[in-house]
Image (cartoon, helix red, strand yellow):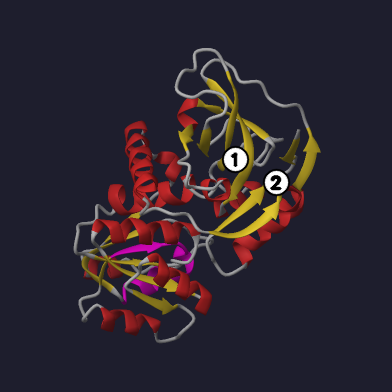
Amino acid sequence: MKAVVVEKFGGPEVLTIKDIAIPTPGPGEVLVKVHACGVNPVDTYIRSGTHAEKPSLPYTPGKDAAGFVENIGPNVDSVKPGDRVYIAGSKTGTYAEFCVCDTSQVQALPEGISFEQGAGIFVPYATAYRALFQKAKVESGETVLVHGASGAVGIAAVQWAKKFGLKVFGTAGTADGADLVMRTGADRVFNHSDPNYLSEIVNASGGHGVDVILEMLANVNLVKDFEVLAKSGRIVVIGSRGSIEFPPRLVMGKDASILGMALFNAEQQDMAEIFSAISHGLTEGFLAPVVGKAFPLEEAAEAHRSVIEAKAFGKTVLKV
């Protein structure tokens, strides 16, 4: 089978296509024929060797994917060959024609969701759910600001928040991105390239400020977030690409909370809650992944460049 293999940490150029053997599922494992796999910013951090999660070399990247169950190992009765599934992590990596997963890593994919959409479910929707409900513990009627709302996690957060009865503000960097965020259900969208966008957010909140901020780029935005955060507000740090100098009195002055999160820290019961909520949302139709760019598997390096350098617009996927 064809698979992307990383033999050394580094830039996108270390992503190479290799012909390797199709893995065999063992007890409690499932072999999935991958039709599409998702590309996440975290994949690029791991590939570069700068992430806390550093796999042994060589490895095949990827946590998100969707396809059919091809085969099952012994002691598997939760799925069967032919089932449509989305993948929530993999033992062998998802940037490949086939991958092996534990049974806990395969979830049913509703018929109305395409494989490309399915490749954009796990990391974005699990991250957004954990940030909103398990970390910030949002309450209906509160106002949430979603930075980078036109990206995959941002879109997921907007969909979750609207269903839960929150007032949703989003930021985007392009007119197309802003239009997507509005169509997704946001109440207001602000262009974060506009030098006055923070004051516009405060005005839109009636001077109260926002109760919760989902922060995708903390090294750029975290200090500025306090200009729009309400007293006793919460900031959930989902992403950051560098260090900052931070004055602690910002937190003290507003009795605020800064909450960090990484999806791999979620406990088993938290993940069970997340999977149940995602299943309900996909089935009911209020969750709908948006695919932005789709690259062939052979262009994984270009996909990695795009997910970091291009303006966020939906989920980036690889077609297998």
Query: At 35% across and 54% down in the image, what residue appears?
Result: 286
Label 1 neighbour load within 10 Å: few <14, some 14-19, many 20+: few
Q: Position of residue 241 (x, y in %)?
A: 53, 61
Q: Position of residue 68 (x, y in %)?
A: 58, 33
Query: At 43% across and 44% down in the image, what residue appears?
Result: 263
Q: Residue furthest toward the right?
A: 19
Q: Position of residue 133 (x, y in %)?
A: 28, 50
Res. 50 visible in picture: no
> In this view of the protein, which residue sits in the foreground, 160 or 270?
160
Query: At 68% across and 36% down in the image, what residue appears?
Result: 59
Marks 1 and 2: in contact by CB < 8 Å?
Answer: yes
Query: At 72% across and 58% down in the image, what residue appears?
Result: 302
- In this rendering, would 71 be left or right of 7? left
Task: Place residue 140 in its image quadrant.
Answer: bottom left
> In this view of the protein, which residue sits in the foreground, 288 or 168?
288
Q: At label 2, which amino acid type do we have?
A: Phe
Q: Which residues are magenta?
A: 212-227
The kind of secondary structure element at disc 2 is loop
The residue under label 2 is 9
Query: What's the CA distance linking mark 2 and mark 1?
Result: 9 Å
Q: Position of residue 152 (x, y in %)?
A: 49, 58
The residue under label 1 is 54
